[in-house]
Structures are given as structure tokens and as C-alpha cells.
Image: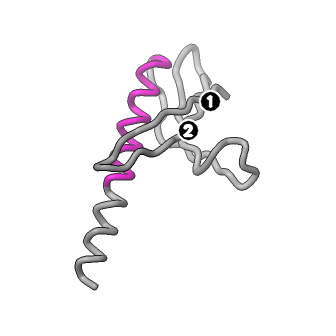
């Protein structure tokens, strides 16, 4: 597994995310999102995208996925804080 670390910015927060890329069929990549630093023994890699055409596009798509995921989480937290 090829592991990539990227820093993304969501609203005013910077977050480090790790992706794992696996090529299973002739240059087609599967993208995994790690729940934590890959060196953490309690880490888990979740498949988020499959059949990506190349490594760079796989990383870009993974970043878009992670930004959307974390933005949704932050928005939901904000809604909960307002309703309390």
C-alpha cells in the first residue's frame, strides 16, 4: 500500500489526513482513508473510492472526499451546538 499524507483546510481548521492507495488492476487505484496516523496500532483504513485511473487523480479525489466528509461533520456539530 502506498501511503500519502495531506493537510486539508476546512473552514478555519487544518487537518492532517492519510490515504492509502492500492493498485489492484493494471493501474486502477483503490483509495483508503486512514482513521489516524498509519503508525498508530488502533488505526483503521476504510475503502472510500475504487477504480481510479491514476495515482494523482486518486489522491485528488480522496482529498475532495475527505474535505466533504469533515465539512459535513463540522456543520453537524455546529447545528447541534445551536440547538442546545
Label 2 to label 1: alpha-carbon separation: 7 Å
Q: Give the side of residue 79 with respect to residue 77, left or right.
A: left
Residue most extreme to the bottom:
84
Residue 78 screen position, x and y as percent = 28, 68
The overriding secondary structure of the stretch rendered in magenta is helix
Who's the residue at 35% across and 37% down the image?
Answer: 64
Residue 18 image label? 2
Q: Secondary structure at mark 1?
A: strand
Q: Residues within 10 Å of mark 1 (few under 14, many from 20)?
A: some
Q: Quadrant of the N terminus?
A: top right
Q: Which mark is residue 3?
A: 1
Quarter of the image with the C terminus is: bottom left
* Residue positioned 49% across, 33% down in the render: 6
Q: Residue furthest top?
A: 26
Residue at image point 28% right, 62% down: 75
Is there a contact, CB below 8 Å, between mark 2 and mark 1? yes
Q: Which residues are magenta?
A: 54-71
Amino acid at each position: 500500500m502506498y501511503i500519502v499524507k495531506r493537510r486539508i483546510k476546512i473552514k478555519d481548521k487544518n487537518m492532517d489526513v492519510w490515504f492509502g492507495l492500492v493498485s489492484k488492476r493494471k493501474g486502477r487505484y483503490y483509495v483508503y482513508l486512514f482513521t489516524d496516523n498509519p503508525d498508530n496500532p488502533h488505526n483503521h483504513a476504510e475503502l472510500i473510492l475504487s477504480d481510479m485511473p491514476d495515482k494523482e487523480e486518486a489522491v485528488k479525489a480522496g482529498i475532495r472526499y475527505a474535505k466533504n466528509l469533515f465539512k459535513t461533520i463540522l456543520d453537524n456539530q455546529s447545528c447541534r451546538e445551536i440547538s442546545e
